[in-house]
Amino acid sequence: MSISVRNSLSFRGSLLIIAVTMLFSSVFSLFFYNHSFDTEIQEARTRLDQLVATVENSAAVAAYLESEDLGLEVVLGLAKNDIVSWVSIQNEVFFASSGDRSQFGAENEVRYSLADPFMEGEVVGELEVVPNTMLINGNARKTALYHARILVLFSLGMVMLVAFLLYTYLT
């Protein structure tokens, strides 16, 4: 009496290992995707904060002096960065922006207070930045998907190796 390959212990054990591993791999990949996505979004926010920090003093001077030329130089310089969609410097009497604000939603804006360059504790204006959320989310999604795929492919490779070894040693 011959045992078919489908009924053999090595085949059923291999199928069980493959099924359980792929289930765990899928669940962990989903968690890893979410974690990678959130990490990328946070890193983009950190890069935006660092970018603003490089021009914050110049923006404060522009607001203090109400200098349109300096203000435009600052906002247009910031707007050249890929992760920035729109920028403005403003106070009660002064406003400089990188373009038309109406095309960007208010839910994504980030506001930075501009400290008076000469009087400590005083605020001379505000720097408002609208991040390029489409680009940031797209990059985060692409990176998270890449990480999740790597995890699934690694798991698949390992389970295939284990299944092959199990089949080899049990037959």
Image (cartoon, helix red, strand yellow):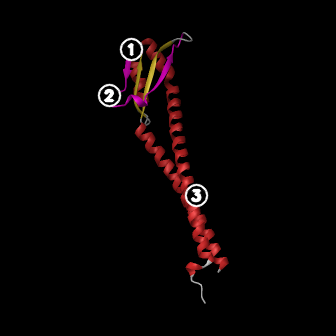
Tell me if 116 is positioned left or right of 102 in this view.
right
Q: Element at badge 2?
A: loop
For the view shown, which residue lies furthest in the bottom direction? 1
Q: Amino acid at mark 1?
A: Phe
Q: Element at badge 1?
A: loop
Quarter of the image with the C terminus is bottom right
Which mark lies nearer to you, 1 or 2? 2
- Quadrant in the picture for residue 91: top left
Marks 1/2 in contact by CB < 8 Å: the verdict is no
Which mark lies nearer to you, 3 or 1? 3
Mark closer to the chain start, 3 or 2: 3
Which residue occupies 38% across, 14% down? 94
| Residue that badge 1 annotates | 94
Mark closer to the chain start, 3 or 1: 3
| Residue that badge 3 annotates | 24
- The stretch of residues the image draws in magenta is 91-118
Q: Amino acid at mark 2?
A: Ser
Q: Residues within 10 Å of mark 3 (few under 14, many from 20)?
A: some
Which residue occupies 57% across, 53% down? 28
| Residue that badge 2 annotates | 102
